[in-house]
Amino acid sequence: MAKRVIEGIEIETGSGNVFADLGLPDAEKLKIKSGLVIEITRAIRKFGLTQDEAGHRMGIPQPKVSAMLRGDFANLSERKLMDCLNRLGYDIEIKVRPTRRPVGHLTLAIA
């Protein structure tokens, strides 16, 4: 992260991953999961589903839907979140390609 001073105020530019900027473990994983949850939230709103209806479609109980919509998705895996999106009528495409770096990374691209 780059730091600069503007009018006496120190500004720090983020990395693009707020979880990494906060120093959280598994930051890349959290970024992917949060992106999936954002899309699930959009889908639920788009279809005008209640939490109970959304839970039924996604195969999870309403309390888990409620927790997810409040940002508590720690108990749901990336795979389960992708399954939820599939059940809401969304396709998911995973693209694998070589990287120039020593270690690759995960990216979530929303169409």
Image (tube, rainbow, N blue to C red):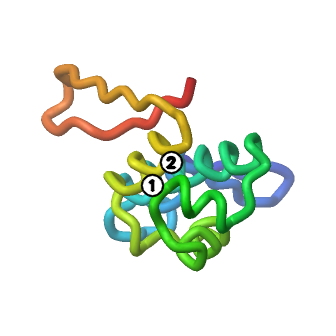
Q: Can you say whether 81 is above or below 89 in the image?
A: below
The residue to which callout 1 is attached is: 33
Q: Residue furthest right?
A: 7
Q: Which amino acid does label 1 sit on?
A: Lys
For the view shown, which residue lies furthest in the bottom direction?
63
Residue depicted at x 55% and y 43%: 88
The residue that mark 2 highlights is 36
Residue 52 lies in what quarter of the image?
bottom right
Say what secondary structure mark 1 lies in. Answer: helix
Residue 46: x and y in percent read 75, 41
Q: Residues within 10 Å of mark 1 (few under 14, many from 20)?
A: many
Residue 74 position, x and y percent, is 43, 72
The quarter of the displayed image where residue 69 is located: bottom right
Q: Is mark 2 on a helix, strand or loop?
A: helix
In this view, the residue in front, 84 or 105, is 84
62 or 75: nearer the viewer: 62
On the question of residue 15 being in view, the answer is: no
37 lies above or below 85: below
Q: In this view, does 9 lie to the left or right of 29?
A: right
The residue positioned 44% from the left and 36% from the top of the image is: 108
**Place of residue 24 in the rendered image (x, y in percent of width and height, measured from the top left):** 41, 70
| Whether label 1 touches label 2, CB < 8 Å | yes
Q: Distance between the residues labelled 1 and 2?
A: 5 Å
**In the image, residue 75 lies at what x, y percent?**
40, 74
Q: Nearer the viewer, residue 57 or 41?
A: 57
